[in-house]
Image (cartoon, rainbow, N blue to C red):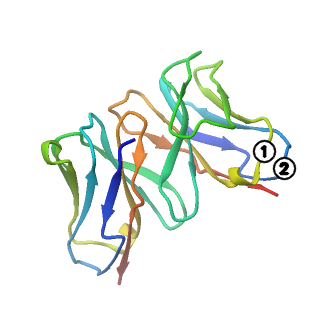
Amino acid sequence: NAGVTQTPKFRVLKTGQSMTLLCAQDMNHEYMYWYRQDPGMGLRLIHYSVGEGTTAKGEVPDGYNVSRLKKQNFLLGLESAAPSQTSVYFCASTLAFTDTQYFGPGTRLTVL
Amino acid sequence: GIQVEQSPPDLILQEGANSTLRCNFSDSVNNLQWFHQNPWGQLINLFYIPSGTKQNGRLSATTVATERYSLLYISSSQTTDSGVYFCAVGGDMRFGAGTRLTVKP
């Protein structure tokens, strides 16, 4: 039981490049979330999903796209990376809205 | 959007001391959660507590929804309690800036 895993752990991009971050969970959770955390701040919700095939916008969705084609995976895409997207990205999953969220270890992304 | 304020921003304790962290929010919410981020960055969800009181070991939390605040109590603090404590509110999980707790041996 690996819990929530994130791939990759670190990445450096140049401005304008694209990439996809993968979040995988093996707990059969319905809800999955993508957050970003900038230095000295709390997390901000980018997008979330309440089930396979569904996605919704969070507080800061601009510049990101997501997909949930399989229940266990939640992908976060950056089509044209910008330096403002330099951050640590966390994925989380939970069985229901009122249940405990389980977090992945984070992906540290630097955009030059 | 909902404004979330946490206090104090920093707290330093000796091991064994008790502490109270506060989270104020600007509007009615049906969701309030507390999180701990350890010094290595790992996040743990401590409580889902939109109202009432919950306890888990040395930690307990109380939310007074009508007055728009929540309190997190840590008793008999240990060095492993160090890190940043966040509250988050609302359907889109608005986070406060956190309280950085340092527990000294």
* Amino acid type, mark 1: Ala
- The answer, for residue A2, to whether it is visible in the render is no
The one of B35 and B28 positioned closer to us in this rendering? B28
Q: Position of residue B28 (x, y in %)?
A: 24, 38
* Amino acid type, mark 2: Thr
| Left or right: residue B100 compared with residue B41 | left
For mark 2, name the chain.
Answer: A
Does A36 appear above or below A61?
Answer: below
The one of B56 and A55 positioned closer to us in this rendering? A55
For mark 1, name the chain.
Answer: A
Does A26 appear above or below A42?
Answer: above
Please identify the quadrant where the C terminus of chain A is shown.
bottom right
Q: CA distance from mark 2 to mark 1?
A: 5 Å
| Left or right: residue A28 compared with residue B45 | right
Q: Position of residue B103 (x, y in %)?
A: 35, 77
Q: Position of residue B99 (x, y in %)?
A: 37, 66
Residue at coordinates 36% horizontally, 70% vertically from top-left?
B9
Q: Residue furthest top?
A: A53
Which residue in the protein does label 2 denote? A15
Density class for disc 2 (Cα within 10 Å; few <14, some 14-19, many ≥20) is: some
Which residue in the protein does label 1 denote? A81
